Amino acid sequence: MTWDYVSAFLDTDGSICLTRSRKKSEPSLQIAFHNSYIELINALKDFIFKETGIQGSVSKKKKQKPNHLDSYDLKYIGARRALLLSKHLKLLHPVKSKKLALAEKLVLLTPRNGKYTETLLAERTVLIQQFHNYSNFH
């Protein structure tokens, strides 16, 4: 496996989004890979961990129709973790590339203690809105 393969996999069967762990919490960056074959998901997880030391989590989604397969998601949640992973990616998908660039800016605006000045919060709100505007196109 190579980083080019991981990048292409994210371009085709992956997502970059903002997610909330709790209803009123600030959104966190998430990079996820989706596939029906657990062996492939585990190979991605092992490669990324070996190369970066970043631990991902795998979840199973039960099939919704009898003729479908169960599917699996490999997720990297949290701004710093996702940003570290993104440094190895070379995305070609135009929307995902733009979302990743916005996410990198968002991480730079996020203080480690989570306490924002009014200026930082205003800038963050604008970036989140831009990010969501691109989310309608994936």
Image (spheres, rainbow, N blue to C red):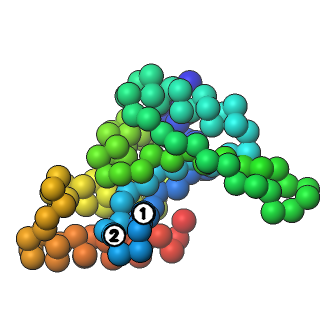
Image: 26 above or below 77 = below
Q: Is residue 59 left or right of residue 126?
A: right
Residue 91 coordinates in the image, percent (x, y): 45, 46
Residue 50 image point, x, y percent = 45, 22
Please tell me which residue lies in front, 21 or 27.
21
Q: Which residue is mark 1?
A: 21
Query: Which residue was labeled with disc 2?
Result: 25
Mark 2 near mark 1, Cβ–Cβ under 8 Å? yes
Task: Residue at 52% x, 55% y: name it.
Answer: 15
Q: Residue at x 56, y 51 (%)?
A: 14
Task: Report whether residue 61 is seen.
Answer: yes
Against 43, residue 73 (above or below) is below
In the image, 66 versus 16, the foreground residue is: 66
Mark 2, secondary structure of its residue: loop
* Residue 40 in the image, given as x and y percentages of width and height: 66, 33
Q: Is residue 136 above or below residue 51?
A: below
Relative horizontal placement of residue 134, taking residue 128 as reference (left or right): right
Quarter in which the C terminus is drawn: bottom right
Please name the amino acid that badge 2 sits on: Ser
